[in-house]
Image (cartoon, rainbow, N blue to C red):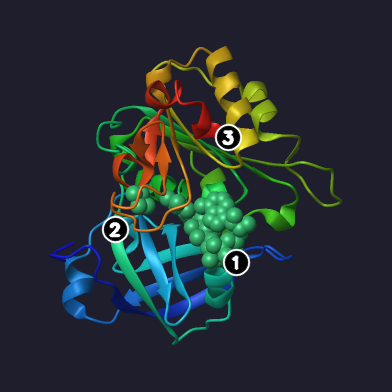
Amino acid sequence: MTADNPYIPYFATIEDNWYETGGDRCIKTFKVVFDDPAVRDSWSHKPGQCAMIGVLGEGESMISISCSPTEGKFLRFSVMKMGKVTQALHKLETGDKITVRGPYGNSFPVDDWQGKKILTIGGGIGQAPLRPIVEYVKANREKYAGLTMIYGARSSGDLCFKGEFDEMSKCDDLSCHLTIDIEEEDWSHNVGFVPQMLLDLNPAPENTVAVTCGPPIMIRFVLENLKKLGFSDEQIYTTLENRMKCGIGKCGRCNAGGMYVCKDGPVFSYAVLKDIPEAFA
Ligand SMILES: Cc1cc2nc3c(=O)[nH]c(=O)nc-3n(C[C@H](O)[C@H](O)[C@H](O)COP(=O)(O)OP(=O)(O)OC[C@H]3O[C@@H](n4cnc5c(N)ncnc54)[C@H](O)[C@@H]3O)c2cc1C
Ligand code: FES
C-alpha cells in the first residue's frame, strides 16, 4: 500500500455483512471497500496479514484479513464478538463506515510454497487467517501440488465459511475434512477433535507444508501430532494473536520471547516458535 504513515486510518464502507455463527461470542463477516479509489487501487496484502479495524468513538482492534487478494478489490474481516470494539463492530450493517489501517505483519510465504502440498489445520475462528491461503491456492491451482483442509469447531453451528466447503470436495486436488466435537443429528462429517482427525488422516510429510491456527490447546496437540507424523519444525507454520495496541512495533504490548508479534509475525514457523514457551500459552 502507498500510505507514507502506517498510523493513517482510511475510511471503508461495509458492502455486505453476515453472521457465520451464533451465540454470545458470535462471528460476523464484513466485506468492506475503501472509500478512496486511490487507496483501493494501491492496497495490496498477502495471506496471513492483518489490519487495524476502527469504529469511530469506540477504538480499534487487530483483525486478520480473511480474504485472499485474488478475490477482488475488497477486504473481508471475520470478527468474534468479544469486548468494546468488536461489540461495536457487530452493531454495524451494510452501508456503515469503519476505518482500516494496514496491512500489518508478515505473511504466509505462499510463493516459497509453490510446488508443494498445503495442509491447513484450523479450529473455530482460527480458520479466518487460513481461509486466504485456501482461496489463494484455489486461484493458483497449477502452482501447488494440492491442498488438504482440516477444520473443526465445537458444533456445526460454530463452523465459519460453511457455504464454501461443498465446492472444494468436488475437486481432485483439493480436499476438505470437517469435524465437530460432539455427535449431531444430520451431521455427515467427522466427529472428534481436530488433532485426532489429523492423526487419522495420516498425511505424508513429504513435500508438504502444514499451517495451523486455532485455540492454543488445539495448536499444542496439532503440533505434537504433526511431529508424530514426521513433519519437521521448518514444515510447520502458525500465526499468533497476542494482544496488540500500536500494531507497528512501538509499544511492546505484543512481546513474545523478545519478538514483537506485530512486527516479526504474526506468521512464524515452528522452528522459530518452539523455544518460546509463552507462544502457545
Ligand atoms: C494478529 C491478530 C489477528 C487477529 N485476528 C482476529 C480475527 O480475524 N477475528 C477476530 O475475531 N479476532 C481476531 N483477533 C483478536 C482481536 O484483535 C480481539 O478479539 C479484539 O481486539 C478484542 O477487542 P475488543 O475491544 O472487542 O475486546 P476487549 O474489550 O479489548 O477484550 C474483551 C475480551 O477479549 C480478550 N481479548 C482481547 N484481545 C484478545 C486477543 N488478541 N487474544 C485473546 N483474547 C483477547 C480480553 O482479554 C477480554 O477478555 C486477532 C488478534 C491479533 C493480534
Ligand atoms: S502491538 Fe505495539 S509493539 Fe506490537
Query: Which residue lies under the disc numbered 3?
Result: 281
Give whichever of discs 2 and 3 has the lower sequence position: 2
Q: Are marks 2 and 3 in contact (CB under 8 Å)?
A: no
Q: Dot 1: few (<14), some (14–19), or many (≥20) neighbours within 10 Å?
A: few
SS under mark 1: loop
What number is the disc on residue 103? 2
Name the residue: 53% across, 48% down: 127
| In the foreground, 211 or 79 | 79
Q: Quadrant of residue 196?
A: top right
- At 58% across and 34% down in the image, what residue appears? 281
Q: Is mark 1 within 8 Å of ligand 1?
A: yes
Q: Determine the residue positioned at 36% across, 75% down.
A: 99
**Residue at x 23%, y 59% (from the top left corner):** 44
Mark in front: 2 vs 3:
3
Earlier in the chain: of badge 1 and badge 2, it is 1
Query: Is 130 positioned to the left or the right of 103 in the image?
Result: right
